[in-house]
Image: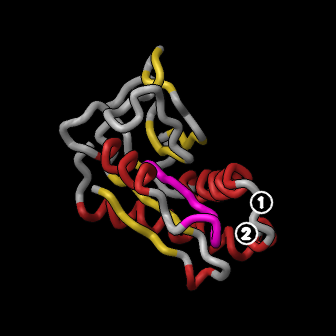
Amino acid sequence: MKLSPEKINELKRLVTQALDKLYQKDFELIKKSVGERSIAFRLGVIMECLKNDNTDFKDYDLDAEYNKNEDDFKRTLSKPNGAMPDLILHKRGNNWNNLLIIEIKRPKKYNGRASDRQKLKDFTNKKGVYQYGLGVFIILGTTKDKVKLEYYL
């Protein structure tokens, strides 16, 4: 989905605000380095609240590990057996309204895997099936100022 620069900036702000709240409310999860799914879930809960306050995004669905493409699995060239993005903001049932895809990695555990970066490139490819408007690779830090964000368009 082709997004305007303004819409991309709004999505970036949504992610940044959600991360700020995650570090305020749920830092204990990050500090203890609990499972990535627990952290992604909490980030998703926060994003759900924030997106519902934004008129541009409130009609979109925010899903965790959503692995379906209609009745089949989400597949890409680098993930032919199926892919499960950590979080996506989309409208279920088609690939015309895929706004945001997020991959999250815990601090200390990963510096970021090439396969996760490739997954984001595949999902944001404007000639591909899914064409997400923005991909975000989040490498969590032991403090908020050490979080690394990589963007894929």
- Where is residue 55? Give x, y as percent: 46, 52
Mark 2, residues whose alpha carbon is within 10 Å: few (<14), some, or many (≥20)?
many
Relative horizontal placement of residue 49, taking residue 85 as reference (left or right): right
Given the image, on which type of amino acid does mark 2 rest?
Ile
The number of numbered badges drawn on the structure is: 2
Residue at disc 2, secondary structure: helix
Q: Nearer the viewer, residue 141 or 68?
A: 141
Are dots 2 and 1 in contact, CB under 8 Å? Answer: yes
Relative horizontal placement of residue 38, taking residue 11 as reference (left or right): right
Relative horizontal placement of residue 19, taking residue 7 as reference (left or right): right
Q: Quadrant of the N terminus?
A: top left
- Where is residue 11? Give x, y as percent: 41, 60
Residue 132, by quadrant, is top left
Mark 1, residues whose alpha carbon is within 10 Å: few (<14), some, or many (≥20)?
few
Question: Residue drawn at (26%, 52%), measured in percent from left and top?
Answer: 3
98 inside magenta stretch: no
Q: Which residue is mark 1?
A: 34
- Where is residue 62? Give x, y as percent: 55, 43
Residue at disc 1, secondary structure: loop
The range drawn in magenta is 101-110
Q: CA distance from mark 2 to mark 1?
A: 7 Å
Question: Residue drawn at (25%, 44%), measured in percent from left and top?
Answer: 125
Q: Nearer the viewer, residue 77 or 58?
A: 77
Given the image, on which type of amino acid does mark 1 rest?
Val
Q: Which residue is mark 2?
A: 30
